[in-house]
Image (cartoon, rainbow, N blue to C red):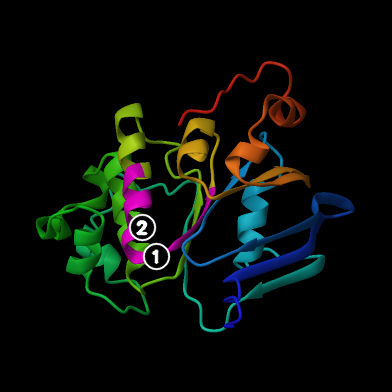
């Protein structure tokens, strides 16, 4: 019998301090190839800190983070502000990527953008268009894992579903694992394989059916949270 493949990411008892205070504590979970893991929780729960610690941007105080050998990880931050006077084009921005496996044109194709966009100024893009360009940047080195911190925070309602549908398409067509911080519980229910409930400590980890219950969400967000499963 063949052994089960190892997870792309294993996190065990992860704790991160800021001064003497815990930001997150005793977090444990795994991420498998092709899986979609959604991280949910109220503001200040430590979700962005978790992503930055996984990427080595912030140091862990204790615990272990183990990435599979040779895995490539892409990351889209919560905010990416572009100076309106910046003369940089999409093509010039993508050319700044130091290591790449695919071409700029192929990366744009993967996110549904025509190659003519390479000549467009970053400062002239809408928030939704900029998110697609940032996603193209993340795809240039053909990652096995993509980390997203609120990928539609600054995107209008019409563009939000388009971004999530695109992520779902990439996950299925390229077998990319996604780790997404999101406040949209309906999106989480629709796309996530597993859900990590975080409020400094880990309150739950499991499938959307197991975790997105009224009782769990009340514990996480308070009495005024309303959500029902849709199938």
The percent coordinates of residue 130 (x first, y second) are 31, 48
Per the image, the residue denoted by label 1 is 175
| Magenta region | 165-180
Q: Residue at x 39, y 65 (%)?
A: 175
The percent coordinates of residue 191 (x first, y second) are 46, 44
The secondary structure type at the circle numbered 1 is loop
Farthest residue in the left direction?
116
Q: Which residue is drawn at 74% across and 26% down?
A: 215
Within 10 Å of disc 1 (Cα), the crowding (few <14, some 14-19, many 20+) is some
Which quadrant of the figure contains the C terminus? top left
Q: Could you tell me if the residues under marks 2 and 1 are in contact, i.e. CB atoms within 8 Å?
A: yes
The secondary structure type at the circle numbered 2 is helix
Per the image, the residue denoted by label 2 is 172
Q: Nearer the viewer, residue 49 or 195?
A: 195
Magenta stretch, main secondary structure class: helix
Is residue 154 left or right of 90 when viewed as pictured?
right
């Amino acid at each position: 019998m063949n052994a089960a493949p190892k997870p792309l990411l294993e996190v065990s008892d992860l704790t991160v301090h800021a001064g003497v205070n815990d930001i997150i504590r005793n977090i444990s979970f795994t991420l498998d190839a092709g899986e979609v893991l959604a991280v949910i929780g109220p503001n200040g729960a430590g979700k962005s800190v978790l992503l930055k610690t996984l990427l080595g941007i912030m140091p862990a105080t204790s615990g272990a983070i183990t990435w599979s050998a040779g895995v490539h990880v892409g990351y889209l931050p919560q905010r990416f502000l572009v100076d309106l006077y910046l003369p940089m084009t999409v093509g010039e921005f993508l050319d700044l990527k130091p290591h790449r496996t695919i071409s700029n044109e192929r990366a744009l194709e993967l996110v549904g953008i025509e190659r003519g966009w390479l000549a467009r100024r970053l400062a002239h893009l809408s928030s939704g268009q900029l998110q697609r360009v940032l996603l193209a940047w993340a795809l240039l080195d053909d990652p096995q894992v993509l980390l997203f911190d609120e990928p539609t925070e600054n995107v209008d309602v019409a563009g939000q579903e388009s971004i999530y549908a695109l992520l779902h398409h990439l996950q299925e067509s390229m077998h990319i694992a996604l780790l997404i911080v999101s406040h949209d519980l309906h999106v989480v229910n629709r796309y996530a394989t597993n859900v990590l409930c975080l409020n400094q400590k880990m309150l739950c980890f499991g499938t959307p059916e197991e975790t997105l219950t009224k009782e769990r969400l009340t514990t996480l967000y308070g009495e005024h949270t309303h959500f029902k499963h849709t199938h």
